[in-house]
Amino acid sequence: MSTDASEVYRRYVGAMVLHGLHAARSCGLGGTDLYALNLLDLNGPMTPGELSAQTGLTTGPTTRLIDRLEEAGFVRRTPSPDDRRKVIVELLAEPAPLAEALAPAREKLGDIFAGYSEEERRTLFDYFARATEALRP
Amino acid sequence: MSTDASEVYRRYVGAMVLHGLHAARSCGLGGTDLYALNLLDLNGPMTPGELSAQTGLTTGPTTRLIDRLEEAGFVRRTPSPDDRRKVIVELLAEPAPLAEALAPAREKLGDIFAGYSEEERRTLFDYFARATEALRP
DNA sequence: AGAAGTCTCTTCGTTGAGGAAGAGATTACG
DNA sequence: CGTAATCTCTTCCTCAACGAAGAGACTTCT
């Protein structure tokens, strides 16, 4: 990875993060809320305890974090079938306000993808899958 | 962009955002600080007024935001040569704590890039550059 | 030159997110 | 069985970040 490529990549990652934060704000979400949503998206449903371990929050703030996300329609709480003390926090289908906030960017990116050959697109998506796995927390 | 590809991509973006937020936290940065740093990285040096317009903050919090970033060694304030009321906020070289936080991920991604052919890497970096431009706020 | 406008910074009050401690319910262990 | 451990949630407190309003320095316009 040359210095030049590294520069391109750094700016790219910055743009992605900025994009995510911007979309989150427009839905009234804070940084931690976005963090939790991405955790749930990448790692699947989990209990408040697991979420609290992965976010680094103590249990009190975690409860209120889940409250916020539930009220906003992002997640759902379900009682755990095995252990009646536990709760399972599950990500719901993408809520309308978020989809709306992301739509313009998605369209632009769709146009970019359309400009590549089938083989190039395969390369890109292969990379996306690998990078996602590599960055899994 | 098929539904499947869209899913891959959504998770990828989530992983990138999570990665950025995680690195920021480990340096004691909040969401807004990260947002501002990325703005400065993508759009170059700017005045506090411009930064306040782009972050959506009023001028008071913007001043303190810059104070925080300056104390942490991320940015530098320089008096504007044309207008002595103005200040130019400039991003410095990446501070050590941030580079340290990002190092493991960079290494992993470097390994991934190393597995592609020269041509595939060109495709990837071409995409990165285009996507960065498309997402510019 | 003087008035009006612009830019940054300061001060003050408010708000919201987070930590600490403990309650209540359930499960596991002796 | 009964005691200890676990899990979520509640309550109270603290603190950091934000907005509003205005001060001070400088520029622009008449």
Image: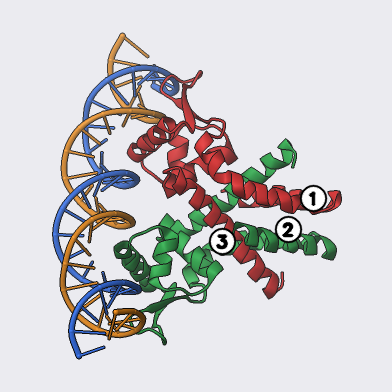
Chain colours: A green, B red, C orange, D blue
Q: What residue do we see at 37% from left, 34% from top?
A: B63
Q: Nearer the viewer, mark 2 or mark 1?
A: 1
The amino acid at mark 2 is: Ile
**Is C17 above or below relative to C1?**
below
Q: Quadrant of residue A43?
A: bottom right
Tag 1, which secondary structure? Answer: helix
Which numbered circle lies on residue B41? none
Q: Quadrant of residue A103?
A: bottom right
Other residues around mark 3 within 10 Å, as few (<14) / some (14–19) / many (≥20): many
- Of all chains, the one bearing label 3 is B
Tag 3, which secondary structure? Answer: helix
Q: Do the numbered discs 2 and 3 sit on residues whose CB atoms are within 8 Å?
A: no
Q: Closer to the camera, A17 or A98?
A: A17
Other residues around mark 1 within 10 Å, as few (<14) / some (14–19) / many (≥20): some
Q: CA distance from mark 3 to mark 1?
A: 22 Å
Which numbered circle lies on residue A112? 2
Q: Residue B17 at what x, y percent from top left? A: 54, 55
Q: Residue B96 at what x, y percent from top left? A: 53, 34
Question: Which residue is denoted by mark 3 in the rendering?
Answer: B14
Q: What residue do we see at 49% from left, 69% from top?
A: A40
